[in-house]
Amino acid sequence: MRKVWIRGGKSVLFLLFLFILWEALVRITETPMWLLPAPSDVIKEAVIGFDTFSVHILSTVYLAILGLVIGCSVGLLIAIILYRLPKVNELLYPLLILSQNIPTIVLAPLLIIWFGFGMMPKLMIISLVCFFPIVVASMDGFRQTAPELKHYMQMVGASRNQIFWKLEFPHSLPSIFSGLKIAATYSVMGAVISEWLGAKKGVGVYMTLAQSSFRIDRVFVAIFFVMLLSIVLFGMIRAIEKVVVKGRNEGA
């Protein structure tokens, strides 16, 4: 625990150094705010305009979390189906890989045309960027179960379902949580992209309006919030991982 705090403290100090350097360079070169605002200007705008920005924050947080839950649930279900049914895996896994080569920025307008400007296309966009890391990480975790343990369970008469749920699934939890942490950062990005293409409120909308009016300080406020939300979601999943995986290990 002490090592974690030391490493975290070093990262915070380095980040603080970067902000100070940024502030100094902007002040020395007298860079105009519409080109590159100083960190102090960004913080000032975040405080002054918080009442306006808070409405957009709630919308993006709701979208990101709901899309993350849906995407991860679907991804885990697909991973279990592909692992348990090898023939289905041979048929669908290449298609899943191909689906990730379609740029989200191209697919999003099509989803909006097909499903309108409601919640569904936004959640579909977020789910699409979240589910693939879960599928890959989960399947890798299932495959990495020690073969001698599987052989032992087969010797004592365990069924295939029992081997999966009592051995392979618990052993895959570290890999599943690795996929969840990646998906958590993707969910915020997916939420912002979906808001760019059709929404009444959200950080993506706030960012677009700020950009069109050359309020670059507001653009940086939105960028910093996206980064902060990604870190918070990552930290939450990491905290859950420590409880769940530790509990599994102690149970074993």
Image (spheres, grey):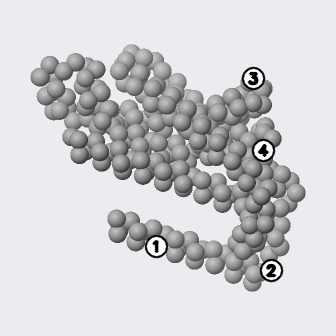
The structure residue drawn at horizontal position 14% and vertical position 19%, both measured from the top left corner, is 157
- What residue is shown with label 3? 114
As drawn, is 157 to the left or to the right of 97?
left
Q: Earlier in the sequence, mark 2 or mark 1?
A: 1
- What residue is shown with label 4? 201
In three-dimensional space, the C-alpha distance between marks 4 and 2, rounded to whole angstroms, equals 34 Å
Identify which amino acid the numbered label 3 is placed on.
Answer: Trp
Identify which amino acid the numbered label 1 is placed on.
Answer: Lys
> In the picture shown, does residue 138 fall above or below 26?
above
Q: Residue pushed farthest front?
A: 51
**Which dot, 2 or 3, sits closer to the camera?**
3
Identify which amino acid the numbered label 2 is placed on.
Answer: Glu
Q: Earlier in the sequence, mark 1 or mark 4?
A: 1
In three-dimensional space, the C-alpha distance between marks 2 and 1, rounded to whole angstroms, equals 30 Å
- What residue is shown with label 2? 30
Q: What element carries label 2?
A: loop
